[in-house]
Amino acid sequence: MMDTGLLIIRIVVGLLFVGHGAQKLFGMFGGYGPKGTGGWMESVGIKPGVAMAVIAGLMELIGGALFAVGLLTPVAAVLIALAMIGAIKVHAPNGIWSTANGYEYPLVMLAIAIGVAFAGAGAYSLDSALNLF
């Protein structure tokens, strides 16, 4: 049962991160691509904006894909965690609640990534199939 729960968490969260990365990198799913995201990042003080958008997008896309399939799960969790720490810093001035554009969502995603890294990806993962962790 626990392995099935970890599989569901990994797939849902991992694919959401793949989507977020695709928004930043390719403008997919309503995203703005590197230029649009980079412009927004510069407007909140993150410079150079385009480069940081690409870095964040790669962390989300690669981290999410690895997380979803349970491959190198601790590495995936670190990539996701770094992206979420950045998001928390950006949203912190607005308080915690997402209804006020706060950091609630990135904090939950950070906790999930770190929690799964500590628990392990579960039996239904490439980490388990390859005896990596």
Image: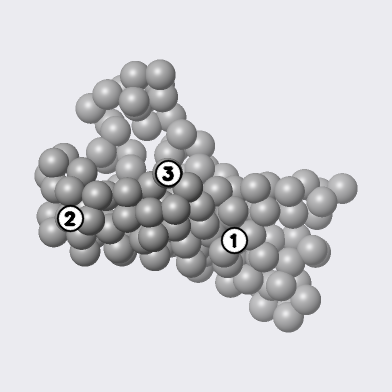
Q: Residues within 10 Å of mark 1 (few under 14, many from 20)?
A: many
Q: Residues within 10 Å of mark 3 (few under 14, many from 20)?
A: few
Q: Mark 2 and mark 3: span between their CA atoms?
A: 19 Å
Residues at marks 2 and 1 touching, judged by CB atoms closer than 8 Å: no
Q: Where residue 107 appears, x then y in whole percent?
A: 44, 37
User: What residue is drawn where x is 34% and y is 25%?
Assistant: 101
User: What residue is drawn where x is 27% and y is 24%?
Assistant: 94
Secondary structure beneath label 3: loop
Circle nearer the viewer, 3 or 1: 3
Secondary structure beneath label 2: helix
Q: Would you name the residue on which mark 2 appears?
A: 49
Question: Going by the image, does 27 lie left or right of 8?
Answer: left
Circle nearer the viewer, 2 or 3: 3
Lower position in the chain sequence, tag 3 or tag 1: 3
Question: Going by the image, does 40 lie left or right of 4?
Answer: left
Q: Would you name the residue on which mark 3 appears?
A: 30
Q: Where residue 9 appears, x then y in whole percent?
A: 68, 47
